[in-house]
Amino acid sequence: MFKNYFKTFKEGFKGYGKATKFIAKNKLSYFYLFPLLLNLILFVLGIKVVDYFSGQINDYISSLLFSESAIDSWWLSFLNGIIYWTVWVVSKIVFVYIFALVGGYFTIIILSPVFTFLSEKTAEIITGEKTKFHLKQLIKDIIRAVILAIRNMIIQSFFSFVFLLASLIPVIGWIIGILGNFLISSYFYGFAFMDYSNERHKLSLRESVLFVRKNKGFASGVGSVFSICFFIPVIGGTLASFLAIMCVVNATIGVEEIRNNTRLIP
């Protein structure tokens, strides 16, 4: 069981190199622009919102603890400064943690139309079969992708909370927390990217769950690098933006190869 998991995980991980070459060869690089711009906007807006609320919190705390005349005292002014920077740092840490937890799903949800189209384009190139465009079907695909992303985000958030509690265990807790969060987020991110292909092959959501569960090693490999990005402060979201495109192509190639039981891309 574990041997097969690690073998297929390796296939999913190695698929990033295959996807990079495929994108360059077939002139699909323009897709990189969409998630890059989105994540930059989300991150900048997030920082602005955090700055605003941390300022509001600081003002509230200062109004409770200090009078205007008291601030003239150097030591109270110094204490006020410590409180300000403590709130500022803690708020940034909380934001980075939340961004690491759900930032990927914002990308997946908002860019569902782009990822759906990219997956179809990749499958067309691989199989030679043209996919007819239907607006109604595209809307159905987007709605399904959003529902799946929200479902996975809720489940992942629950497990992340469990691993956060586990990280409080002395000595080994932090290892359990980091490794557990990495594995669970890798799986669910990989699941989301694979489902674009499963939807195209008319698998129901339940059938898609069973298909991905059967190929969980590959799913985790596909989502692994994307997951790691959100643990990197500041630039993680930007890196993940690029990788999201590779993930979709990687997952699409992998699903087609699994279904056909043959290697389609050398």
Image (tube, rainbow, N blue to C red):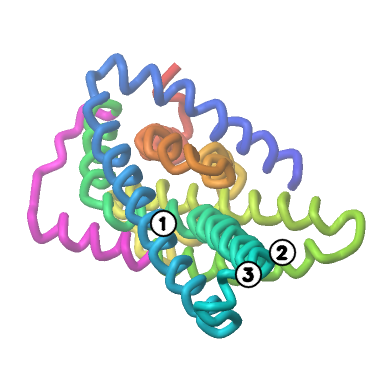
Distance, label 1 to label 2, CA atoms, is 19 Å
Distance, label 3 to label 2, CA atoms, is 45 Å
The residue at 39%/37% (across/down) is 256
Q: Earlier in the sequence, mark 3 or mark 2?
A: 3
Q: Which x, y percent locates residue 196?
A: 33, 49
Image mark for residue 34: none
Amino acid, disc 3 = Ser
Q: Nearer the viewer, mark 1 or mark 3?
A: 3
Q: Earlier in the sequence, mark 1 or mark 3?
A: 3
Image mark for residue 105: 1
43 in relation to 118, above or below = below
Amino acid, disc 1 = Tyr
Q: Magenta region: which residues?
A: 127-148
Foreground pick, 61 / 211: 61
Task: Locate residue 140: give its quadrant.
Answer: bottom left
Name the quadrant of the C terminus: top left
Query: Is residue 178 shown left or right of residue 186?
Result: right
Say whether marks 1 and 2 touch (CB < 8 Å): no
Q: Secondary structure at mark 2?
A: helix
Residue 219 is at least partly visible in this image: no
The residue at 51%/81% (across/down) is 63
Q: Which residue is mark 3?
A: 73
Q: Secondary structure at mark 3?
A: loop
Residue 58 within the magenta-colored segment of the rendering: no
Residue neighbourhood size for the residue with mark 2, other residues' Cα within 10 Å, grouped as few (<14), some (14–19), many (≥20): many
Image mark for residue 163: 2
Query: Is residue 29 shown left or right of residue 266?
Result: left
Foreground pick, 45 / 86: 86
Residue 155 is at least partly visible in this image: yes
Amino acid, disc 2 = Phe
Q: Which x, y percent locates residue 13?
A: 56, 32
